[in-house]
Image (cartoon, rainbow, N blue to C red):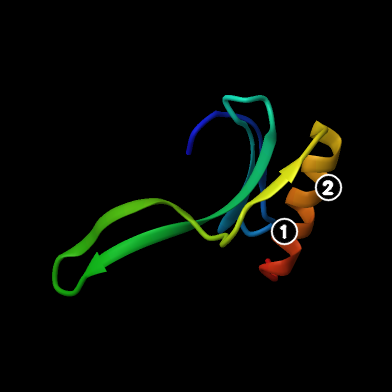
Amino acid sequence: MNGEIVRTIPSPSGRFRACVIRTTVGALRVEVERWTEEWVPGYGKVAEFWELATVGTTYADTIERAEELAHEALRTWGD
């Protein structure tokens, strides 16, 4: 991820989040991430992290529009 996260919008369950990122050139990009846990049988949890869930790129010109797109993206994940 190149840029600064200016808003993070969690899904109702907390399993997903949409990040509004201001890129180094000033554009606003929306990305959806999913919470991921990796388990090894007989050992337990070995990792947990936010993993990029979206494919493609969504840009907006205002923070308000970026937030609308972020909420819409979370709804498409059904969460």
Q: Secondary structure at mark 2?
A: helix
Q: Dot 2, crowdedness within 10 Å: few (<14), some or many (≥20)?
A: few
Q: Secondary structure at mark 1?
A: helix
Residue at horizontal 78%, vertical 50%?
A: 69
Query: Which residue position holds label 1?
Result: 73
Q: Label 2 to label 1, Cα distance in Å?
A: 9 Å
Q: Residue furthest bottom?
A: 41
Q: Position of 42 compared to 17: left or right?
A: left
Kind of residue at badge 2:
Glu
Query: Which residue position holds label 2?
Result: 68
Q: Residue furthest front?
A: 25
Residue 8 percent coordinates (x, y): 64, 38
Residue at horizontal 26%, vertical 66%?
A: 39
Residue at horizontal 28%, vertical 54%?
A: 47
Mark 2 vs mark 1: which is more N-terminal?
A: 2
Q: Tell me, yes or no, whether the two marked residues, 2 and 1, touch with CB atoms within 8 Å.
A: no
Residue 57 has which mark?
none
Number of numbered discs: 2
Placement of 68 over or under 61, stated as above or below: below
Nearer the observer, 30 or 39: 30
Nearer the observer, 19 or 24: 24
Residue 59 percent coordinates (x, y): 71, 44
Residue 25 percent coordinates (x, y): 62, 25
Q: Quadrant of residue 61?
A: top right
Kind of residue at badge 1:
Ala
